[in-house]
Image (cartoon, rainbow, N blue to C red):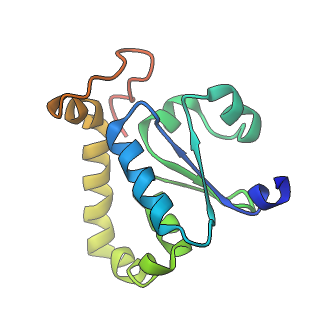
């Protein structure tokens, strides 16, 4: 089982974020081949042990995707890399990587990521205050 996990792409997400948790739920349904391993960054000791190159504040500010060979993708680029792993979405990666679309996608991702806890509160889902607050800028 450990060899299987090591060969999967790790997705580091914020388990205190309702948007993030719901997104992970959807990605799990789409990941028929089980190529993605989802890890909650709130379990920081585990994340730090496996991925010492990842900084806690950065991991709380945006999704981090670590490939089996150690390559690191964050934010929108991380989502693109995840989509490459999922057959149902792989077709969309060239379109979403097209420079004008990628430029806009990165900005929209960063805008939502910076405001995700406030967005959670809009839907009545309060989260922690200072412990897991994302950085002020991405």
The location of residue 62, given as percent across then percent down, is 43, 43
* Quadrant (top left/top right/bottom left/bottom right) for the N terminus: bottom right
Q: Is residue 128 above or below residue 31?
A: above
The location of residue 132, given as percent across then percent down, is 43, 23
* Quadrant (top left/top right/bottom left/bottom right) for the C terminus: top left
Please indicate whether residue 2 sits to the left or right of residue 9 in the image: right
Q: Is residue 32 above or below residue 56?
A: below
Please indicate whether residue 123 sits to the left or right of residue 39 in the image: left
Q: Quadrant of residue 72?
A: bottom right
Q: Is residue 37 above or below residue 126?
A: below
Determine if residue 33 is in view.
yes
Q: Residue at x 21, y 36 (%)?
A: 119
Q: How many marks?
A: 0
Extreme top residue here?
130
The location of residue 5, given as percent across then percent down, is 75, 56
Q: Residue at x 25, y 45 (%)?
A: 111
The location of residue 135, given as percent across then percent down, is 39, 29
Q: Residue at x 54, y 28 (%)?
A: 42
Determine if residue 77 is in view.
no
Q: Residue at x 61, y 29 (%)?
A: 43
Extreme left residue here?
122
Q: Is residue 124 above or below residue 85?
A: above
């Amino acid at each position: 089982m450990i060899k299987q996990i090591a060969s999967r792409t790790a997705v580091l997400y914020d388990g205190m974020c309702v948007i993030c948790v719901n997104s992970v739920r959807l990605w799990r349904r789409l990941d028929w081949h089980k190529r993605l391993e989802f890890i909650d960054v709130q379990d920081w000791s585990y994340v730090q042990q496996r991925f010492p190159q990842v900084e806690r504040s950065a991991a709380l500010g945006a999704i981090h995707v670590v490939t089996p060979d150690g390559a690191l993708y964050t934010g929108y680029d991380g989502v693109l890399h995840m989509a490459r792993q999922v057959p149902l979405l792989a077709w969309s990666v060239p379109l979403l990587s097209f420079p004008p679309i990628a430029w806009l996608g990165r900005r929209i991702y960063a805008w939502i990521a910076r405001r995700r806890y406030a967005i959670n509160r809009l839907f009545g889902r309060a989260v922690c205050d200072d412990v897991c607050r994302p950085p002020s800028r991405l």
